[in-house]
């Protein structure tokens, strides 16, 4: 365990223990015994994770004299989908026992176990089986409810076992997915800088360091990850764990999630890739969202918002009804639409508030641009990194046309209240101009064509 992880755990988080390394499945029993003395265990897995880790985990638990109830094992195929129905199913299967769940899981099944455990008033242990997401140690669970993906508040696992050898043997697409989830922390950091400069969401330097400190190092070896290099896998896994711990410390996903994630949330709610087997992963969609936002930031850095005409902008400032009409026109799906209307309404400013915001943007623009320029990577660099690791990097790979991608920029701005550069551009009235520039001749997406 690294010094950064030890430092975060010392903050008294839900997660008390993280064991990471080669051949650490044998530590599951001792960790369980220390955290849950005298309790029974129940393993939760699917067919794939059961094959990957169950034998050693069961031996480890048995060696410490820990009694085990019958395991809950979901089929390997079709891939489990993290929605409210499967959470209810797991709750019903766990409720006859008081045993502590031990999930052998990557992203979706871990989230399901996390929320089900919380609803039953229990803590649990997670054994990570792939470096596919950053939610292992996060305090919430991403669950689809009535077609809308939402973060359900629930405690993080009490203990986490991170077997790097098991993760290195996982399918390459899972590692690429985790890489895609992680690389969005770069523009997400830029979004946080924007909010910080405008006094909306001040940066916590300690939490910033947990995520951003080791981030570039973790992302720096995509080809070695493809080759299964243990050192590269360790760096990736550590950063995925650190991201979750940072969210625990900050009690928010702000340190690890920006507008690039919103593309993924929008596409997931629209159903892109959900009928595939295996389904298109969250991390793959987040990776594409990262390219999209990096391209946007490339253009944002060319702007001079210190010279915006505040009076002219206020003359076109939308009323509440006008903004709601805009959102409803953008979001034809009724379930998504109602949620987006509420989110957008919550962040719409009055004209007096808008004047203050625009003046602040004008005055702080030089500092914003300087700090953002030091944070972001050019879109072409991000795209190549995703190519190198085998992740999604072009919209056609998930069945999204360039026209749909263009619309996604606007839709992404409507689905969350958290302030990002999309909101800044909407505030100054230049979102359309900047997005259009990406798709016109010479623009980033125009140059890459409709397909790859």
Image (cartoon, grey):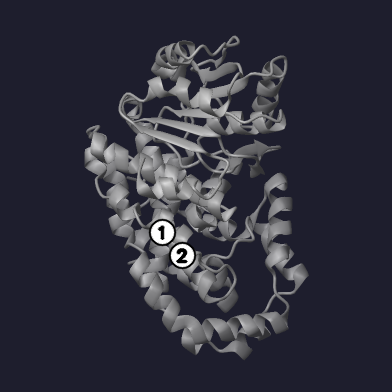
Q: Residues within 10 Å of mark 1 (few under 14, many from 20)?
A: some
For residue 290, side relative to residue 157 (left or right): left
In the rendered image, which quarter contains the N terminus? top left
Q: Determine the residue located farthest toward the right in the rendered image.
A: 321
In the rendered image, which quarter contains the C terminus? top left
Near-viewer residue (18 or 330): 18
Q: Residue 251, relative to residue 136: is it above or below?
A: below
Near-viewer residue (269 or 37): 37
Q: Dot 2: what SS?
A: helix
Task: Determine the residue positioned at 43% across, 15% down.
Answer: 60
> Which of the numbered marks, if any, corresponds to residue 70?
none
Pointer 2: what residue? Answer: 205
Q: Position of residue 341 (x, y in %)?
A: 72, 58
Q: CA distance from mark 1 to mark 2?
A: 6 Å
**Residue 291 visible in the snapshot:** yes
Q: Which quadrant holds residue 100?
A: top right
Q: Which quadrant holds residue 128?
A: top left
Pointer 1: what residue? Answer: 209
Q: Position of residue 426 (x, y in %)?
A: 58, 71
Q: Which quadrant holds residue 80?
A: top right
Task: Determine the residue positioned at 58% across, 75% down.
Answer: 199
Q: Dot 1: what SS?
A: helix
**Residue 302 visible in the snapshot:** no
Near-viewer residue (360 or 308): 360
Q: Residue 103, relative to residue 408: is it above or below?
A: above
Q: Position of residue 152 (x, y in %)?
A: 66, 42
Task: Determine the residue positioned at 59% across, 40% down.
Answer: 142
Q: Position of residue 82 (x, y in %)?
A: 59, 31
Q: Residue 160, relative to residue 337: is it above or below?
A: above
């Amino acid at each position: 365990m690294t010094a950064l992880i030890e430092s975060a755990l010392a903050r008294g988080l839900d997660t008390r223990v993280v064991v990471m390394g080669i051949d650490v499945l044998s530590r599951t029993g001792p960790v369980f015994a220390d955290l849950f003395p005298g309790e029974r265990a129940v393993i939760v897995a699917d067919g794939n994770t059961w094959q990957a880790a169950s034998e050693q985990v069961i031996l480890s638990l048995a060696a410490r004299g820990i009694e085990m109830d019958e395991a809950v094992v979901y089929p390997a195929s079709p891939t489990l989908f993290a929605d409210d129905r499967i959470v209810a199913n797991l709750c019903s299967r766990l409720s006859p026992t008081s045993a502590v769940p031990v999930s052998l899981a990557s992203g979706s099944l871990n989230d399901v176990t996390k929320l089900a455990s919380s609803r039953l008033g229990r803590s649990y242990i997670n054994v990570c089986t792939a470096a596919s997401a950053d939610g292992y140690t996060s305090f919430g669970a991403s669950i689809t409810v009535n077609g809308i993906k939402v973060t359900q508040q629930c405690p993080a696992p009490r203990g986490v076992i991170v077997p790097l050898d098991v993760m290195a043997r996982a399918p390459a697409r899972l590692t690429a997915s985790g890489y895609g989830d992680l690389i969005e922390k770069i523009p997400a950091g830029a979004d946080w800088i924007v909010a910080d400069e405008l006094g909306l969401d001040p940066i916590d330097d300690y939490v910033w360091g947990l995520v951003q400190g080791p981030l570039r190092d973790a992302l720096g070896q995509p080809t070695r990850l493809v080759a299964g290099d243990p050192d590269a896998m360790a760096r990736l896994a550590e950063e995925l764990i650190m991201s979750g711990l940072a969210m625990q410390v900050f009690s928010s996903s702000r340190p690890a999630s920006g507008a690039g994630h919103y593309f993924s949330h929008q596409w997931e709610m629209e159903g892109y890739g959900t009928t595939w087997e295996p389904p298109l992963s969250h991390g793959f969609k987040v990776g594409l969202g990262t390219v999209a936002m990096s391209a946007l930031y490339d253009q944002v850095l060319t702007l001079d918002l210190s010279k915006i005409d505040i009076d002219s902008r206020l003359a076109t400032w939308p009323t509440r009804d006008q903004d709601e009409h805009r959102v409803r026109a953008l979001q034809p799906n009724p379930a998504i639409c109602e949620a987006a209307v509420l989110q957008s309404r919550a962040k719409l400013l009055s004209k007096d508030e808008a004047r203050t915001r625009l003046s602040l943007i004008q005055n702080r623009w030089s500092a914003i641009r300087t700090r953002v320029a030091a944070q972001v990577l050019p879109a072409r660099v991000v795209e190549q990194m995703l190519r190198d690791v085998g992740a999604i990097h072009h919209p056609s790979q998930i069945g999204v046309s360039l026209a749909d991608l263009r619309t996604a920029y606007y839709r992404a701005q409507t689905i969350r209240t958290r302030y990002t550069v999309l909101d800044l551009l909407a505030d100054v009235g230049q979102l359309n101009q900047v997005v259009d520039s990406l798709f016109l001749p010479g623009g980033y997406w125009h140059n890459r064509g409709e397909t790859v």
